[in-house]
Image (cartoon, coloured by chain):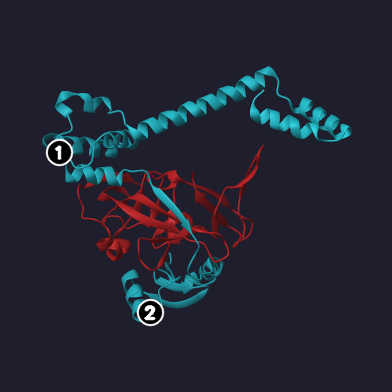
Chain colours: A red, B cyan
């Protein structure tokens, strides 16, 4: 199990609590994705690759996944628009549970009750954005040297 | 002398002479000068003040200026107008301001204000041990080596083994659910 530690003058503390390989420079459907990390959304039983995007204000879920988790979300209250790389889209903000997954022996999974923009108009990949998700966790990326060495480290910001 | 320092000195006193000298030399070498001490003290005071302020806001949020105005009093009659304002703040990327507004509103004024309070709350996290077997490294390797043959398809992978390829995520989910094989499976749409 590989963890990252923070060294201070009082000793070292564990900084990351889990890690997993990630896929770099790939395509999901028609969309280029730079860093894809494995996650699970709400109680949808399948694992999924999502785009890790520090430049995105919100996490975004589109119709593919929405179909399977719709009954786990509350009713839509008020639609709003956000600007994305695919243009302006309509949708709603929901509280959505997203879990970053690890392989056995690689530490703990991290689940965040996140604020996520859910839109039937979004046909891009699932996006993990800053507000309501990344802002509450710490993460680091080891790009490795050869394929298979890329590791995504993560933990809860405390 | 405070209690912690007294404790440290007692420990050093208990050492043999040679070791006392070594510790004293080390302390003098590492001892911060006045400027360093001032900087460290200032840093700790700033952090303390910031933490106190955060705790104060969390316990009794100060209403933002807009909610102090009589026309914006938080009542069921004004709820619609306040909700529209929150929506405008979010659409213009002023999320922290929107959070301050909802934090200052007590629950139960209107269903929609309660909704905004819920969705704009800071994310809450928990960690737990993985309960399902998976091998992401092998799944990624499979994609590297085989994706070209499944362009545009949804593939289901389990630790580097292909379980099937499908036209849609819905088909993939439906088929695997019927066979009871969903746990730890990666659903991936191969690039077209």
Name the quarter where the N terminus of chain A is drawn: bottom right
- Residue B141 horizontal side relative to residue A84, left or right: right
- Mark 1 and mark 2 lie on one chain; the one further toward the N terminus is 1
Q: Nearer the viewer, residue B154 or B160?
A: B160
Asked if one can make out residue B93 in the rendered structure from this viewpoint, the answer is: no
Q: Nearer the viewer, residue A105 or B25?
A: B25
Identify whether B117 is placed above or below A104.
above
Identify whether A113 is placed above or below A42.
above
Question: Do the residues indicated by labels 1 and 2 lie within the same chain of the protein?
Answer: yes
Residue A97: quadrant of the picture: bottom left
> Extreme top residue here?
B34
Q: Residue at x 24, y 56 (%)?
A: A74
Which x, y percent locates residue A59? 37, 50
- Residue B20 horizontal side relative to residue A105, left or right: right
Identify whether B58 is placed above or below B40.
below
Helix, strand or loop status at disc 1: helix
> Extreme bottom residue here?
B179
Disc 2: CA contacts within 10 A as few (<14), some (14-19) or many (>=20): few
Asked if one can make out residue B124 in the rendered structure from this viewpoint, the answer is: yes
Disc number for residue B180? 2
Q: CA distance from mark 1 to mark 2?
A: 47 Å
> Extreme left residue here?
B77
Disc 1: CA contacts within 10 A as few (<14), some (14-19) or many (>=20): some
Instruction: Chain letter for mark 2, please.
Output: B
What residue is shown with label 1?
A: B80
Which x, y percent locates residue B190? 43, 67
Q: Residue at x 33, y 43 (%)?
A: B121
Identify whether B118 is placed above or below A2.
above
Q: Nearer the viewer, residue B145 or A74?
A: A74
Which x, y percent locates residue B171? 32, 74
């Amino acid at each position: 199990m590989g963890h990252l530690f923070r060294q201070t003058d009082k000793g070292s503390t564990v900084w990351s609590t889990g890690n997993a390989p990630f896929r770099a420079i790939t395509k999901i459907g028609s969309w280029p994705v730079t860093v894809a990390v494995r996650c699970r959304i709400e109680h949808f039983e399948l694992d999924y690759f999502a785009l890790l995007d520090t430049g995105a204000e919100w996490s975004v879920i589109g119709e593919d996944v929405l179909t399977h988790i719709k009954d786990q979300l509350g009713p839509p209250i008020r639609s709003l628009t956000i600007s994305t790389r695919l243009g302006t889209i309509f949708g709603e903000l929901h509280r959505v549970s997203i879990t970053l997954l690890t392989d056995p022996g690689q530490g703990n999974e991290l689940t965040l009750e996140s604020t996520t923009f859910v839109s039937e108009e979004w046909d891009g990949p699932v996006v993990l954005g800053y507000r309501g998700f990344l802002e509450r966790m710490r993460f680091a990326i080891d790009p490795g040297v050869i394929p298979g060495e890329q590791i995504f480290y993560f933990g809860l910001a405390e | 002398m405070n209690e912690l320092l007294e404790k440290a000195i007692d420990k050093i006193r208990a050492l043999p002479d040679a070791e006392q000298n070594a510790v004293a030399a080390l302390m003098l070498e590492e001892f911060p000068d006045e400027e360093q001490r001032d900087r460290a003290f200032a840093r700790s005071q700033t952090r303390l003040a910031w933490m106190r302020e955060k705790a104060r806001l969390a316990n009794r949020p100060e209403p933002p200026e807009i909610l102090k105005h009589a026309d914006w009093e938080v009542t069921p009659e004004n709820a619609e107008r306040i909700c529209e304002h929150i929506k405008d703040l979010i659409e213009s990327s002023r999320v922290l301001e929107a959070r301050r507004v909802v934090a200052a509103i007590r629950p139960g004024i209107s269903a929609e204000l309660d909704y905004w309070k819920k969705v704009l709350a800071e994310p809450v996290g928990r960690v737990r041990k993985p309960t399902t077997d998976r091998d992401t490294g092998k799944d990624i390797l499979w994609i590297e080596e085989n994706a070209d043959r499944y362009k545009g398809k949804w593939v289901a992978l389990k630790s580097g083994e292909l379980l099937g390829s499908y036209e849609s995520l819905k088909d993939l989910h439906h088929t695997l659910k019927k066979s009871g094989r969903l746990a730890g499976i990666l659903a991936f749409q191969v690039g077209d």
